[in-house]
Amino acid sequence: MVDQLSKIVPVIMAGGRGTRLWPISRSSRPKQFLALAGQDSLFQETLQRVADSDQFAAPIIVTNDEYRFLVAEQAQEMGIELGAILLEPAARNTTAAILAAALYLKQQDEEDQLIYVLASDHKVKADAGYQEAVKLAANCAQDGALVTFGITPTEPATGYGYIKQGDGLANGGHKVAEFVEKPQLERAQEMLHAGGYYWNSGTFMMPRDGFVAECEQLAPETHAAVSDAVAKAASDLDFVRLDKDCFEQAPDISVDYAIFEKTDRAVVVPSAFSWSDLGSWDAVWKVGEGDAGGNVARGEVTLSDTKNSLVYSDAGHVAVHGLENVAVVVSEDAVFVGNLNEAQRVGDIVKRLKGREETQALTETHKTSYRPWGGYSSLVMGERFQVKRLFVKPGKQLSLQKHHHRAEHWVVVTGTAEVTVGDKVQMLGENQSVYIPQGEVHRLANPGKIMLELIEVQTGSYFGEDDIIRLEDEFGRS
């Protein structure tokens, strides 16, 4: 049993590379870091749900090296202090990720704690029903249960797993009678009609030490590998890097299969709050604010004689006429159009694109790429030249670097640039420019109070990111 006065420690999973919301979500910036159904990103909305310091301790984030600065920056934007950012050196599914967080917390404090495991890419309405479910789950976990939140189904959804509730408990939870894989429609309709079945939300409340003990007994290979990875972890700036060699020995298995389907401590808490995993464009449509015709529009959109559709534009004005039940999704460099009811098939399209060399990049990166200092957009690329738009945040600077295969011309469009070329440092204002010869050491910084924007023209024989030779870097990149 856990101390009744312990704060709950949120453990947020933020390493997923979801592609089901392509072309907006891609592996370099997946859906958890995008504002798909609100002003803030899904990750930021998750942080807000656990921001009450009277109830929750500082959250632990489990992510990977590629997303570490996205996590840190988006938390900083919300003014939320994090307990730690754990970096997975390889994807090993939820058992290893949750266990790493639990063992890290145990390393910091031997006194047991409740851990509240959340996905960073779910859309949740944190209303009174949500608060009541969290409270009930905490009570069950304090009694030693491993609790999963079961969402009251509103339709016979075939994209979710289900949980069947068993005998009721004195603390308000129910024993788990059965886990059901994603069903066919007929089976989903039967479960909805029968009652007592809930969507498996992938959200958990557990006593930290109880979960570790169950992993040691039921998933000994994972426990051994992750224990070693945490013991040999290294600090890197504000991050904790789990040991690569040890962590890679952990089996790739979800916590549902490894623990919850085997343990006798599994409890489900029926939860009536609004929840979606936003696993497809039709799910985004369902949670959006529709017009009189049932349409959900985002970005610059004009609709004419169109019904029950989702139109989402990140680039340019989109006009749709005379269609019904469609998804139209426009990014900077790709467009998806399909039947809204079959939007789950986007994953199959992404696999096809990923399998072709000429389209693989469309599944990985956007034309606009984000970095700790700001980012850049690719505007034009030719055989021996490339044009980019750079944007640098106030007070940030790029690494001190050089290139073997290209020269660069910078033209300041907005703001003030501090430019280092060789041993010379100069300030540039709007409409001023500078030339960086091939092989010359250089750096760009923004000493001002507003965003710095430049046009960069690269000329040379090769423009790959691996031609960046970093000599100094405040973000720890090599």
Image: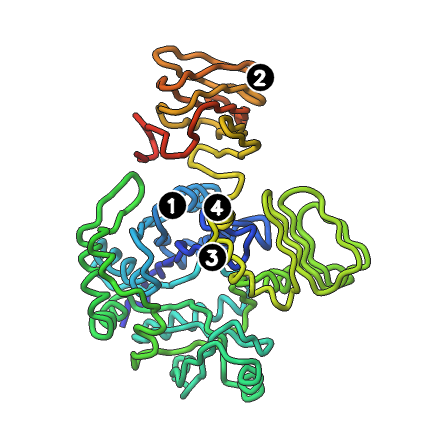
Mark 1, Cα crowd under 10 Å, few <14 / some 14-19 / many 20+, is some
Kindly report the distance in space between the C-alpha atoms of the residues bearing marks 1 and 2. Answer: 33 Å
Q: Which residue is denoted by mark 2 in the rendering?
A: 430
Q: Which mark is residue 192?
A: none
Three-letter code, disc 3: Gly
- Comparing marks 1 and 2, which lies closer to the viewer? 1
Rendered residue at 40%/43% (across/down): 72
10, 369: nearer the viewer: 369
Residue 361 image label: 4
Q: Position of residue 312 (x, y in %)?
A: 65, 52
Question: Relative to the observer, which residue lies in front, 238 or 427?
Answer: 427
Q: Amino acid at mark 4?
A: Ala
Residue located 61% across and 64% down the image: 282
Mark 2 Cα shell of 10 Å, populated few (<14), some (14-19), many (≥20): some
Q: What residue does disc 3 label?
A: 18
Horizontal relation, residue 257 to residue 414: left or right: left
Please say if the residues under marks 4 and 2 sit with CB atoms less than 8 Å apart. no
Mark seen at residue 66: 1
